[in-house]
Amino acid sequence: MFQLKWLWHNLKGDRVRYILALILSVAGSSLTIINPYIGQRIVDTFITGDNAAQNLTDERSLLIGLCFGMVGFTLLRTGMAYFTTLLYERASQNMLYRVRIFLYNKIQGQDMQYYDRNRTGDLMTKMTGDLDMVRHTMAWIIKTIIESLTIFIAAVVYFFYIDAELTWWLLILAPPIFIVAFIFARRVRPMYGDLREKLSQLNTVTQENIAGNRVVKAFAREEFEVEKFGEKNVNYSKANKAAAMVWLDYFPYLETFAQAFFVILMLAGGFLIMDGRITFGEFSAFSALIWGLANPMRTIGIIINDIQRFFASLNKIVDVYYAEPRIVNEHKGNEKRRYEGRIEFDNVSFKYDNAVVLENISFSVEPGETIAIMGATGSGKTSLINLIPRFYDVSKGRVIVDGTDVRKLEIDELRGNIGVATQDVLLFSDTIDGNIAYGDPDMPEEDVENFAKLAAAHDFIRKMPDGYNTIVGERGVGLSGGQKQRIALSRAMAVKPPILILDDTTSAVDNETEEHIQKSLRELDFTCTKIIIAQRVSTTAEADRILILDNGRVIEEGTHAELLKKRGYYYEVFKLQNEGIGRQATTHG
């Protein structure tokens, strides 16, 4: 079975420990027949036997020895059970640690399309609840199955040794119990797949609302979000109850069959004692071990419940475990080199699923040049720049950096030569210093401050409670949009990249700050090719070249002056923005 092979593969390093635990489980469970056997000897020899009274006097040492034997075997089984549980826990926890590390690395190595297709809440559920269910199965469910099966077999063998007829009377209940368990398993398995999906949806809604709490509060939509969460919670609760009710449908049958063992033992055993077929001691042995038959039957439903949960969880984990990124690092190099920064788009087309996003884009950028990209929302600007660091791959054509197709470059080397600052800024829950120096953790503090000055961030950082050591909240909570953009710009410039990509990173700053940033970008002390997505003409005016995108095509290209002469899209944007400025000036005047 594939699932068991997967578990065995991931037990590497703890296989000996786990096998030892399995052996001890079998050995410890087999010892359960010892005390009933000793009890049988005591009853037949010292209580109900023909010479019981005489034996109490003559065989007192034997009685004492048997009693000490019962105590000794009980202590032995207790010690073995403790040590066995310790081995199971150690092996399962070690496996959980290794698999979680592997899955995290696997998720980190996925391309952007993987994150587009998979919800964050779903991935979090796989990394937490699903993995813990697998560990629970390794540490407890398999242990319970092995021990229950061993006790059942040991009890049956011992019962046959005492009296085959009574044993067959007891085993007559086994087939109907297994039939009920099989029907229950078939009914409940798809329900746990659905239950797992409902949990994933619940976690996704929770994650989205916690991450987007500012938006929720800004629109006073708390009540709506509570209702939405309540709906997902109700769906999960209903799925949970439905699975539980299936178990409750079958529980009376299983419990009745389990209790029927005692009824059969009382009836059949009683007749056999009266016929002299078995002794009172043998009957007491049956009574002491009957739980070895009844208990596995009683717990079989619970075991099936957990096994179905295990399969549902493991299938989700395997989806991540064997997921392969479409963009892979096929050209690993030993030494990282610094690029010159020459970029060329050669008849590039890009599709996302079946939607055409870019079509036949061709242009080139020389080292040190500044290219500005403008266009309406949805024109393909961000998709275009995402092709340079290979966040996505082209559908047709080539993206060339320093004369080499990016698909033939080492990915870490390529991305290490590109600084990226996006409009949707993500700052980590770290110090401001740590966020700016994210690309180079060993960066001196003087350099951090220098790049913050270039991005017009130094002044407001210095005024914060702990300056550069101020901890910013998750995603930069506590900072304004413009402050976050300037820290992100500092972070992008701090690695001194030969290629700098800025996706509308000055949209939330004032004109004076933007002018300071533009001046800093022009006067960088290292050669840097800059590709800037912007909507402000003030940002694009001094670029060496401006590209205008519309519906995935370049419709205009040229300098600021050349595009104004064409009186096309760029001219209309320029006129609209300048008329707006003029009207504002007149109004305030």
Image (tube, rainbow, N blue to C red):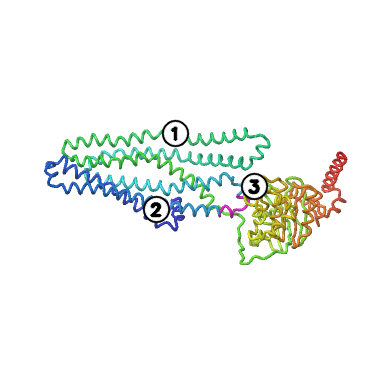
**Residue 46: x %, y % from top left:** 16, 42
Q: Amino acid at mark 3?
A: Arg
> Alpha-carbon distance for marks 1 and 2?
35 Å
From where the camera sits, is residue 200 visible? yes
Q: Amino acid at mark 1?
A: Met
Q: Amino acid at mark 2?
A: Leu
> Alpha-carbon distance for marks 3 and 1?
43 Å
From where the camera sits, is residue 418 visible? no
Q: Is residue 121 left or right of residue 84?
A: right
Quick one: label 3 or label 1, which is nearer the N terminus? 1
Is 108 inside the magenta-drawn segment?
A: yes
Q: Which mark is residue 245?
A: 1
Q: Which mark is residue 87?
A: 2
Of the residues tagged 1 and 2, which is closer to the observer?
A: 2
| Secondary structure beneath label 1 | helix
The span shown in magenta is: 105-114
Q: Label 3: which residue?
A: 475
